[in-house]
Image: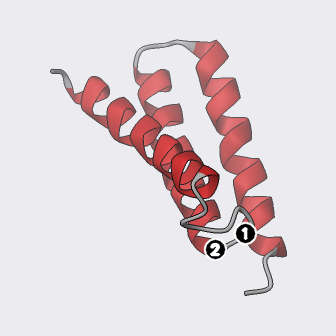
């Protein structure tokens, strides 16, 4: 497994972890943990997509990253 595969897998894994934990009620979808998992995950996935020059996912994950930062800023807990 190459470097970009490892980075991308970790990133996507964190995003999925946040989604599953929220879906099963283990974390709140408006909690800081939820947004932090998404920020780190999307950042890693964006970087991995950049490394392989796959621009549609750079845009997707970059947007996910920015929206998650906005969500984190808006959290009150």
Q: Position of residue 25 (x, y in %)?
A: 61, 62
Disc 1 versus disc 2: distance between alpha carbons?
A: 6 Å
The residue located at (40%, 40%) in the rendering is: 13
Q: Quadrant of the N terminus?
A: top left
For image coordinates 78% across by 77% down, the residue present is: 75
Which residue extends farthest front?
Answer: 24
Report the coloring of the rendering.
secondary structure
For mark 2, what is the residue?
32
Give the secondary structure at mark 1.
helix
Disc sitting over residue 72 in the figure: 1
Which residue is painted at 53% across and 56% down in the image?
A: 21
Q: Is residue 72 left or right of residue 19?
A: right
Relative to residue 26, is residue 62 drawn left or right?
right
Rendered location of residue 56, percent (x, y): 66, 14
| Residue at 72% from the left image edge and 87% from the top image edge | 77
Give the vertical position of 8 relative to 27 (above or below): above
- Few, some or many C-alpha atoms within 10 Å of disc 1 (few <14, some 14-19, many ≥20)? many
């Amino acid at each position: 497994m190459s470097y970009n595969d490892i980075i991308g897998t970790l990133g996507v894994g964190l995003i999925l972890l946040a989604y599953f934990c929220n879906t099963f009620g283990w974390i709140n979808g408006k909690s800081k943990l939820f947004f932090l998992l998404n920020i780190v995950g999307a950042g890693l996935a964006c970087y991995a997509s950049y490394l392989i020059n796959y621009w549609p996912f750079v845009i997707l994950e970059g947007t996910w990253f920015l929206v998650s930062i906005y969500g984190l800023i808006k959290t009150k807990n």
